[in-house]
C-alpha cells in the first residue's frame, strides 16, 4: 500500500508546537483508549493542520528555535527483553514515519493503534499490547521519581476506559523540569513527538511516572572481563560481557595498550601471549554503546607463563605454526632455515650477514621472537661468545659478549636468549671453570656475573650449562657439578642468591651428561637429565615447596633408555614433556596429559624419518601438539611434528631450500 506523504522533522515539530498553543481547548477529546471528538473541535483541529501546513510550505513560518529530535539507535531488542531508551525512541519514530493514525480497532506491526498499543510497540512488549491501566505498578512497571525519569519511561493515567491514557517520556525540555519531549498517540490524529507539560495537560486526570524494569539504565554498566586461571601460554581467548544491549564494540587492552576490538556478541578476542614477557599482565575491556558512552571494566590479572624452550633448542615451532632452525653447517658457519606464515621457506647464513663475524665451533642455539626477529648465539673460532641478531628495521648486528665485558672465554656450548624488551642474556662455562652470564639491561649497560662464586661452596660445573633470565629480572642457571649432582644457582626478587642441590635434596641418581632446567613464573623449578642408572629423570618442586623426583623411563614400560643428553619442559598447565634419542637410535618422548596418564611416543618410528645422530630437542606447545628437531643419520636437519588434527609430519629443513649445507659434526 502506498505510504502517505511524510513531513520533515522540522515540519512535525512546528506542527506539534503550534497545536500545543491551543491544546487546552482540545486535549480532553484526545485522551483515552476510545476518544471521541465533537465535530466543532475536529473542525478546529483540521483548520489548524491545514493552516500550519500551508504556512510551512510557503516559508512564512519556520520551525521554532527550540525544536528537538530524540536520540535514536539501532534496535537490537527482543520482545519482553532488555531495551535501551534510544531503541524505544527508534521504534516510536517508526510509527511516525509510517503515518500511523489512532484507532482502537486497527493494528500495525501486530499492535493496537491506540495510545497504549503505541507505547507497547515502542517498549517491545507482548502483542497486541497492554492497556494504560496495566502499565501502572504492574507487568514490569514500577514507580519512578520525577527527577529520575529517563528516555523510555512512561507517564500513565491508569483510569479505566476512555479516561485512561499513556505517553512515552523522551527527555526534559530544560533544567526546570516543567515540560518534556514525549511520544504519544491521541484521538486527534497521527502518532507524534512534541513537548508536553509535566505530567500532562491539566484536566486530563492524574498521571503517574513509571519505569519499565527491562529498560536499560541511563548510565551504561561497565563490562566484565572473564578471569582465566592461574597461568596462560600460547594464544588464549579473552572474553568480556556486558548487560547494556546497545553495546556495539568491545575493545580489549593489555597493560593499557589496545590489542584489538570485536563487534560481535559474545565479545571475545584471541591474545597471543608469546608476544609478552612471562609474569602478570592486566587485561581490561572498554564497551562502546550506541550513545557513544565508553565505560571501562575493572582489570583482570592474567599470568603469562610461556616456556622459552627455544633458548636451548636448535629448532622451535612458534604459536603461529611457523618453524625456525639453527645449526652449524659443514662450512662451520651459523645457519638457519625458517618459514613464514605464507609458507615460504628461507635459509640464512648468520655468520656472513655481518662481515667479520667469526665462524662457529660446537653447537649454536637460536630463537625466533614473536616480533619476527632472530637471535643466534655460539662460541666463535676465537673462543669468545658471539651473537648475530636483527632488529625490527631489518638491520643485522653481531656482538662479542665476552669481549665487550672482559668475561672469560667459553668452554663448551653456550646458551642465550633475547627477551621481549630487547635485552640479551647468555650463559656458559668460562675458561676458569665457573658458570658465567653476560647480560644487558634496558639502559644499554652490560653486566658479567660469576654464578659459581655468588654462593660460596657451590661446585664448578662439569660440562655444558643452561640458564635463563625471567621476565621479573631474576636469573636461574642449571648444571652438573663436579660432584656429579644436579645444581642450580638463582636469585630472587630481593636480590638474594641461592644454590640448590636437586639430586642431593631428593635422593635422585647422579647426573650423566648435560642437564636442562627451567624456573617458572610461579617460582618453581623443573630440571631434566639422564641419571647414572641410564634413565631419564626429573626433579621439580610445587608451590607448596615440596620436592618430587620422577623416572620418565619407567613411567611407561617398554620405553627405551636415553642415549645422550635429554631435554624436557614443564608446561603452564603442570604437565611434563621430555625428548631424547633412545638406545634404538629413534627419537622418543615421554609425557603426561591433564588426566595424569603417561604416554611414550616414537617420533621417527611413526613417520619413517631417519634415525637420530647426537642430541635432539623438542617442545610441547600450548595447543597440545609436539615439535622435535634433530640431526638425521643422513646429516640433514629434520623435524617431526603433529598438528591439531592428529596428523604427523616429517620435514627435512636442509633440503627445504636448495644450497643449504648439511649440519656440521
Image (cartoon, helix red, strand yellow):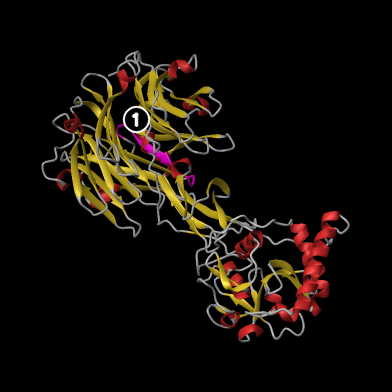
Nearer the observer, 160 or 323 = 160
Q: Is residue 129 depicted above or below 313 in this figure?
A: below
**Residue position for label 1:** 315
Magenta includes 468?
yes
Helix, strand or loop at disc 1? strand
Nearer the observer, 214 or 612 = 214
Magenta span main SS: loop
Q: Residues within 10 Å of mark 1 (few under 14, many from 20)?
A: many
Quadrant where the C terminus lies? top left
Asked if one can make out residue 216 in the rendered structure from this viewpoint, the answer is no
* Residue found farthest to the front: 39
**Quadrant of the rendered image containing residue 557:** top left
Q: Position of residue 203 (x, y in %)?
A: 76, 85
Q: Which residues are magenta?
A: 462-473
Q: Position of residue 230 (x, y in %)?
A: 40, 56
Asked if one can make out residue 644 in the rendered structure from this viewpoint, the answer is yes
Magenta includes 290?
no
Nearer the observer, 593 or 562 = 593
**Quadrant of the rendered image containing residue 639:** top left
Q: Position of residue 71 (x, y in %)?
A: 68, 60
Q: Position of residue 440 (x, y in %)?
A: 52, 35
Amino acid at each position: 500500500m502506498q505510504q502517505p506523504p511524510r513531513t520533515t522533522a522540522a515540519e512535525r515539530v512546528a506542527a506539534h508546537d503550534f497545536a500545543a498553543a491551543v491544546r487546552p481547548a482540545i486535549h480532553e477529546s484526545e485522551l483515552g483508549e476510545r476518544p471521541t471528538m465533537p465535530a466543532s473541535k475536529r473542525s478546529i483541529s483540521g483548520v489548524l493542520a491545514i493552516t500550519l501546513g500551508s504556512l510551512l510550505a510557503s516559508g512564512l513560518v519556520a520551525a521554532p528555535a527550540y525544536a528537538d529530535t530524540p536520540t535514536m539507535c539501532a534496535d537490537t531488542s527482543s520482545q519482553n527483553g532488555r531495551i535501551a531508551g534510544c531503541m524505544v525512541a527508534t521504534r516510536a519514530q517508526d510509527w511516525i514515519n509510517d503515518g500511523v493514525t489512532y484507532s482502537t480497532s486497527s493494528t500495525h506491526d501486530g499492535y493496537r493503534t491506540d495510545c497504549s498499543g503505541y507505547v507497547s510497540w515502542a517498549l517491545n512488549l507482548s502483542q497486541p499490547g497492554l492497556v494504560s491501566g496495566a502499565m501502572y505498578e504492574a507487568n514490569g512497571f514500577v514507580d519512578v521519581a520525577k527527577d529520575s525519569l529517563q528516555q523510555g519511561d512512561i507517564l500513565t493515567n491508569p483510569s479505566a476506559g476512555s479516561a485512561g491514557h499513556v505517553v512515552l517520556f523522551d527527555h526534559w525540555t530544560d533544567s526546570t523540569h516543567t515540560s518534556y519531549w514525549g511520544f504519544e498517540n491521541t484521538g486527534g490524529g497521527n502518532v507524534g513527538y512534541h513537548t508536553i507539560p509535566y505530567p500532562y495537560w491539566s484536566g486530563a486526570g492524574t498521571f503517574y511516572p513509571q519505569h519499565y524494569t527491562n529498560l536499560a539504565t541511563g548510565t551504561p554498566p561497565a563490562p566484565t572481563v572473564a578471569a582465566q586461571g592461574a597461568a596462560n601460554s600460547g594464544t588464549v581467548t579473552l572474553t568480556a560481557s556486558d548487560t547494556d544491549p546497545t553495546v556495539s564494540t568491545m575493545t580489549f587492552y593489555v597493560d593499557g595498550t589496545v590489542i584489538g576490538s570485536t563487534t560481535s556478541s559474545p565479545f571475545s578476542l584471541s591474545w597471543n601471549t608469546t608476544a609478552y614477557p612471562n609474569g602478570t599482565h592486566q587485561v581490561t575491556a572498554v564497551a562502546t554503546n550506541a550513545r557513544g558512552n565508553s565505560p571501562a571494566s575493572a582489570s583482570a590479572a592474567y599470568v603469562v607463563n610461556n616456556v622459552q624452550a627455544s633458548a636451548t633448542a636448535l629448532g622451535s615451532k612458534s604459536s603461529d605454526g611457523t618453524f625456525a632452525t639453527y645449526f652449524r653447517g659443514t662450512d662451520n658457519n651459523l645457519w638457519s632455515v625458517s618459514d613464514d606464515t605464507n609458507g615460504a621457506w628461507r635459509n640464512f647464513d648468520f655468520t656472513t650477514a655481518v662481515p667479520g663475524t667469526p665462524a662457529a665451533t660446537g653447537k649454536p642455539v637460536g630463537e625466533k621472537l614473536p616480533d619476527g626477529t632472530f637471535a643466534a648465539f655460539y662460541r666463535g673460532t676465537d673462543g669468545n661468545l658471539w651473537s648475530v641478531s636483527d632488529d625490527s628495521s631489518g638491520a643485522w648486528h653481531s656482538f662479542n659478549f665476552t669481549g665487550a665485558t672482559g668475561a672469560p672465554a667459553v668452554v663448551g656450548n653456550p646458551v642465550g636468549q633475547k627477551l621481549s624488551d630487547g635485552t640479551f642474556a647468555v650463559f656458559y662455562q668460562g675458561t676458569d671453570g665457573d658458570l658465567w652470564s653476560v647480560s644487558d639491561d634496558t639502559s644499554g649497560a652490560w653486566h658479567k656475573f660469576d654464578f659459581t662464586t655468588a654462593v660460596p661452596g657451590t661446585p664448578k660445573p662439569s660440562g655444558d650449562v643452561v640458564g635463563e633470565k625471567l621476565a621479573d629480572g631474576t636469573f636461574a642457571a642449571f648444571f652438573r657439578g663436579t660432584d656429579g649432582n644436579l645444581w642450580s644457582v638463582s636469585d630472587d626478587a630481593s636480590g638474594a642468591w641461592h644454590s640448590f642441590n636437586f639430586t642431593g635434596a631428593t635422593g635422585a641418581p647422579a647426573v650423566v651428561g648435560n642437564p636442562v632446567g627451567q624456573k617458572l613464573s610461579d617460582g618453581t623449578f623443573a630440571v631434566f637429565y639422564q641419571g647414572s642408572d641410564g634413565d631419564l629423570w626429573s626433579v621439580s618442586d610445587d608451590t607448596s615447596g615440596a620436592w618430587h623426583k620422577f623416572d620418565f623411563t619407567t613411567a611407561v614400560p617398554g620405553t627405551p633408555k636415553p642415549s645422550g643428553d635429554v631435554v624436557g619442559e614443564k608446561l603452564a598447565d603442570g604437565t611434563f614433556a621430555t625428548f631424547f634419542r633412545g638406545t634404538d637410535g629413534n627419537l622418543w618422548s615421554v609425557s603426561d596429559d591433564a588426566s595424569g596418564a603417561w604416554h611414550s611416543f616414537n617420533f621417527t618410528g611413526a613417520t619413517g624419518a631417519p634415525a637420530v645422530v647426537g642430541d635432539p630437542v623438542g617442545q610441547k606447545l600450548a595447543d597440545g601438539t609436539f615439535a622435535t628437531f634433530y640431526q638425521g643419520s643422513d646429516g640433514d636437519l629434520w623435524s617431526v611434528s603433529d598438528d591439531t588434527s592428529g596428523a604427523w609430519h616429517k620435514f627435512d629443513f636442509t633440503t627445504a631450500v636448495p644450497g643449504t649445507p648439511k649440519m656440521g659434526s
